[in-house]
């Protein structure tokens, strides 16, 4: 009996080890990333193309500065002078070495923030836009909430370690996607090298972008690196190929650039850009009430398109009003067209009038328009009577 129990115990131990090993292998297969958390979005539609642990709150180091720049661009004037106060002077970590009371334009500060990752520039910008770091962080958190980044909380504008300063991979991807829709932000984060003034010196500050993807990855668009011991290596990245543009986040990822390239390669390989309706395509006509014309053409505003896998079969649903009352300008919305895959909306575009609609003139106006013709006819009749 003792031998049988031992053998039975060994059998259960082997089974347990097999199951644990099998579970670990399955987890590795499911994960498909070396990052502790990751998320990749399609920029146009916001569709999640890849996600792992995307909703876990984690520190994000200097990738914080994506939101700092977004709020500054939305609230500030690029030409406005930004003065370096006591709180910004000598901030620890990466710096552009601002002098006390040194002044740069907001645009120059943003170059220092995003290319050289200046923690001092972040504080100077925060105090300039928000009046204080605390006031600016409130603005950052309000903007994050408006974007649906509900797992994010900003305590400072630069990402230095602080209790409660967290985001999620998906939240940060949403924030980055919005930032990349700003032309100035996009230009700065795609810049490899720039120079800005250095007060009191006979030469300029030279800023070098540490994002290797800009030189090593086809179609790379930026956008921001970050590192602290607490957060590990964090990277917000993006690329565009043909009509498809993606934005991604890798948090606490040791091989950040290589992993970002691998994730983007996988997304570009797994998804194709499908355009169901091109911009301006006719989708029929609509009845016009009280108009000179009895009907008007309807077109789609913006291409109805989305990234899809080979196995996904999209369907198009059109919602359009029964009629429209004149007058109306060209471009007035009269409905929507939606691309669905299963129960998920991929894209939605307005349906608009292809031309302006004139209102049918009233009886008095019609009579006044016809009066000169009628008067001329009466004169001709009288002349014939003579």
Image (spheres, helix red, strand yellow):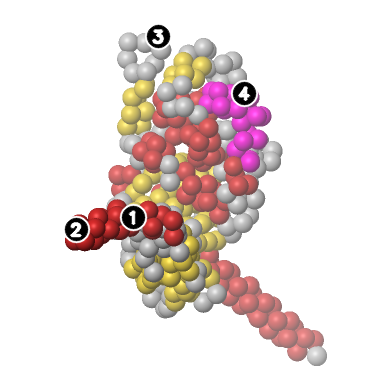
Residue for badge 4: 131
Disc 3 to disc 1, C-alpha distance: 81 Å
Against 75, residue 232 (above or below) is below
Residue 371's disc is: 1
Residue at (60%, 27%) from the top-left corner? 130
Callout 4 secondary element: loop
Disc 4 to disc 1, C-alpha distance: 68 Å
- What x and y, as percent, mark residue 166? 63, 44
Question: Answer yes or no: do the residues labelled 1 and 2 have beta carbons within 8 Å?
Answer: no
Task: State left or right for residue 265 relative to residue 342.
Answer: left
Residue for badge 3: 200
Disc 2 to disc 3, C-alpha distance: 100 Å
Disc 4 to disc 2, C-alpha distance: 90 Å
Say few, some or many: other residues with alpha carbon within 10 Å of mark 4 (under 14 / 14 to 19 / 20 or more): few
Mark 4 vs mark 1: which is more N-terminal? 4
The image quadrant where one finds the C terminus is bottom left
Question: Answer yes or no: do the residues labelled 3 and 1 have beta carbons within 8 Å?
Answer: no
Say few, some or many: other residues with alpha carbon within 10 Å of mark 3 (under 14 / 14 to 19 / 20 or more): few
Magenta stretch encompasses residue 93: no
Residue 280 seen in this snapshot: yes
Please state which of the two labelled residues, at mark 4 or mark 2, is closer to the viewer. Answer: 2
Residue at (52%, 56%) from the top-left corner? 38
Residue at (57%, 68%) from the top-left corner? 27
The image quadrant where one finds the N terminus is bottom right
Magenta residues, start to end: 124-142
Residue for badge 2: 386
Mark 3 vs mark 1: which is more N-terminal? 3
Asked whether 369 or 148 is in front, the reply is 369
């Amino acid at each position: 009996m003792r031998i049988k129990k031992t053998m039975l115990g060994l059998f259960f131990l082997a089974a347990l080890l097999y199951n644990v090993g099998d579970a670990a292998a399955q987890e590795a297969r499911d994960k498909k990333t070396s990052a502790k958390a990751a998320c990749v979005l399609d920029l146009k539609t916001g569709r999640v193309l890849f996600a792992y642990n995307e909703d876990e709150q984690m520190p994000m180091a200097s990738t914080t500065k994506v939101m700092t720049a977004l709020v500054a661009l939305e609230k500030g004037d690029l030409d406005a002078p930004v003065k370096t106060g006591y709180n910004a002077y000598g901030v620890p970590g990466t710096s552009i070495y601002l002098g006390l009371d040194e002044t740069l334009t907001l645009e120059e500060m943003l170059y220092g923030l995003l290319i050289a990752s200046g923690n001092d520039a972040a504080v100077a910008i925060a105090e300039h836009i928000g009046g204080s770091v605390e006031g600016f962080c409130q603005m950052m958190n309000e903007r994050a909430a408006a974007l649906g980044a509900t797992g994010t909380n900003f305590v400072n504008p630069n990402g230095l370690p602080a209790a409660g300063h967290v985001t999620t991979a998906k939240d940060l991807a949403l924030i980055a996607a919005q930032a990349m829709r700003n032309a100035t932000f996009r230009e700065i984060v795609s810049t490899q090298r720039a120079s800005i003034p250095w007060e009191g010196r006979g030469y300029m500050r030279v800023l070098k972008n540490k994002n290797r993807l800009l030189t090593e990855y086809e179609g790379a668009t930026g956008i921001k690196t970050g590192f602290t011991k607490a957060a590990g290596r964090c990277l917000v990245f993006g690329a565009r190929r043909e009509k498809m543009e993606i934005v991604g986040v890798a948090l606490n990822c040791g091989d950040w650039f290589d992993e970002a390239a691998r994730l983007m390669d996988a997304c570009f390989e797994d998804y194709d850009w499908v355009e169901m309706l091109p911009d301006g395509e006719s989708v029929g006509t609509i009845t016009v009430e009280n108009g000179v014309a009895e009907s008007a053409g309807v077109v789609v505003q913006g291409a109805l398109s989305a990234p899809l896998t080979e196995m996904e079969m999209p369907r198009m649903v059109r919602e359009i009003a029964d009629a429209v009352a004149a007058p109306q300008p060209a471009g007035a919305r009269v409905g929507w067209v939606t691309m669905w895959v299963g129960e998920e909306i991929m894209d939605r575009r307005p349906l608009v009038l292809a031309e302006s609609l004139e209102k049918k003139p009233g009886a008095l106006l019609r009579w006044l328009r016809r009066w000169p013709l009628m008067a001329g006819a009466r004169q001709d009749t009288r002349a014939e009577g003579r």
